[in-house]
Amino acid sequence: METVVRMNGVVALIAEKLVDRGYFQTKSEAFRTAMLELGHKYGLTDPRELEDELAARKIEKISRDIDAGKRTVTPLAEVLRESRRRK
C-alpha cells in the first residue's frame, strides 16, 4: 500500500527540523517512525495480528487480480509435471 502525505505548516517544519538535525535521513522516514510510534501508543502493533491482516489483504488482492484476468492459476499437477520434464 502506498500513501501520499502532504505536510505543511507546523508539521512540515517539524519534519524538516528532524531531518536537518540528523534524526532521520528523510521526511518519509520521520513520518514512518511517527506512524509506528502512534500505532504502539494506541495498541495497534501486535505483530501476529498485523501479519495476519497483511496476509489477508494480499490474498484478497491476488483473488481480485485472478478475477480480473491479471494473474493466472496453474494447477499443482501441471507445475509438478513441468518440473519433472525440465530435470
Image: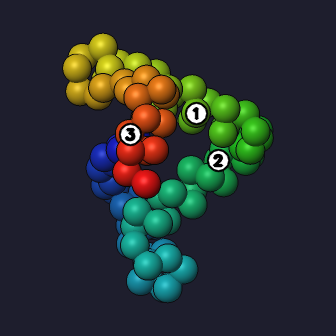
Label 2: which secondary element: helix
Estimate how packed mark 3 is, as few (under 14), some (14 to 19) or many (20 or more) residues with alpha carbons within 10 Å.
few
Of pointers 3 and 2, the one earlier in the residue sequence: 2
Front-lying residue, 46 or 24: 46
Q: Estimate the spatial distance between the alpha carbons at disc 2 and disc 1, rounded to whole Å.
A: 22 Å
Label 1: which secondary element: helix
Estimate how packed mark 2 is, as few (under 14), some (14 to 19) or many (20 or more) residues with alpha carbons within 10 Å.
few
Q: Residue at x 43, y 35 (%)?
A: 81
Estimate how packed mark 1 is, as few (under 14), some (14 to 19) or many (20 or more) residues with alpha carbons within 10 Å.
few
Res. 22 in view = yes
> In the drawing, does residue 28 fall left or right of residue 52?
left
Residue 73: x and y, percent?
Answer: 37, 24
Q: Estimate the spatial distance between the alpha carbons at disc 1 and disc 3, rounded to whole Å.
A: 28 Å
Q: Residue at x 48, y 85 (%)?
A: 21
**Dot label at residue 38:** 2
From this viewpoint, which residue is outermost toward the top? 67
**Dot label at residue 82:** 3
Kindly identify the amino acid type of the residue bearing the numbered disc 2. Leu
Indicate how the structure is coloured in the image: rainbow
Q: Residue at x 49, y 28 (%)?
A: 76
Label 3: which secondary element: helix
Q: Look at the picture and state if 29 lies above or below 3.
A: below
Front-lying residue, 18 or 39: 39
Q: Residue at x 44, y 79 (%)?
A: 25
**Dot label at residue 55:** 1
